[in-house]
Image: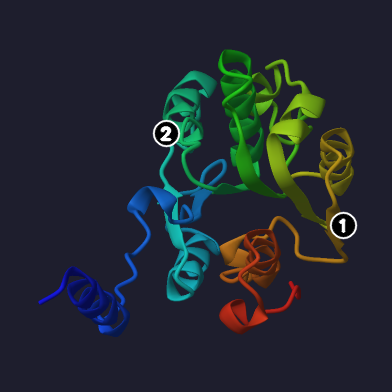
Amino acid sequence: MSCSFKCLCMLLLGVCARVVVAAPAASERPAQPLVIIIHGYAATPADHWFGWLENALTERGIEARRIALPDPTAPKPRAWAERLDLLTRNTQRPVYFVAHSLGGIALLASLQRRIDADPAGAHWAGLVLVSAFADPLPALPQLDAFVAARLDFDAIHAHVDRQLVITARDDPIVPFNLSMALAERLHSPLLLAPDGGHFLGRDGYTRLPAVLSALRDMIGAGNDRFGCNASL
C-alpha cells in the first residue's frame, strides 16, 4: 500500500469519526449564585417570611441559606460580627444578601470590615435590606451599640453590584424615614410601601414577594423561572 493511499485512508477515517466535544471544565463553568438570609432582633431563621423565601429560591434552582445569629433577644454586636464575618468572606461566587431589621446594620458593618481588610477582593453581587436602619431607634435604645460602627456607605455601594431597601410607611419599630435615610446614604433604590408595618409574621407577612422579585432582577434568572411580581 502506497504512502499516499495510507494518508488518504487516514484522512477519510478522520472525517467520518465521531466528533466528541469535551464538557467545560468545572473551573470554566459560571459560578452559581448563593442567597444568604439574615434575621433581625428577637427573631430566628424560622420566623416571618424567611423560610418561604428560602423555599421559593430553592424551587427555582437558586441555593439559599437562612443564618442563625446568637442570642437574638439580647444581641451583642461582637457575637453577631463573628458569625457574619465568616459569611462575607465568600467572594468566590455571586453572593446576595437579604437582611431584615437589625440584621441589616449588622451585615453592613461586616461588609465594611471586609472592605477594610481586603479592598481589592471584597465584592458582592447584591443586597436587599428590609426595614433596615443605620441610626438609633427611639423605641429600642438597647440596640444603639449596633449603629456605633463607622461605615463608609460610598465604599459599600462601590463593592456591591446592586442594592435595594424596602420599608413601609406604617412601620412602628423602624420609622420609614430611617430606612429612607439609609437608602440615600447607600445610593440605593428604595421601595416604600404604603403599609406593611415591620413585615412580621405575626402581622401576616409569612411571604414577601417583593424580595423574591428583587432577587429575580438582580440574579437575572427571568420571569419564567421566578414567576412573581413586586406586590407586598
Question: Going 40% across and 33% down the picture, which residue do you hit?
Answer: 70
- What is the quadrant of the N terminus in the image? bottom left
Relative to 135, residue 23 above or below: below
Question: Going 69% across and 39% down the picture, which residue do you hit?
Answer: 160
Q: Position of residue 214 (x, y in %)?
A: 70, 63
- Foreground pick, 110 / 11: 11
Q: Along the polypeptide, which appears first: circle 1 or circle 2?
A: 2
- What is the quadrant of the C terminus in the image? bottom right
- Foreground pick, 24 / 222: 24
Number of the label disc, if any, that sits on residue 71: 2
Taking the image as shown, residue 152 lies to the left or right of residue 64, namely right
Relative to 171, residue 149 above or below: above
Any part of residue 172 in sight: no
Q: Position of residue 113 (x, y in %)?
A: 59, 19
Q: Amino acid at mark 2?
A: Asp
Residue that badge 1 annotates: 169
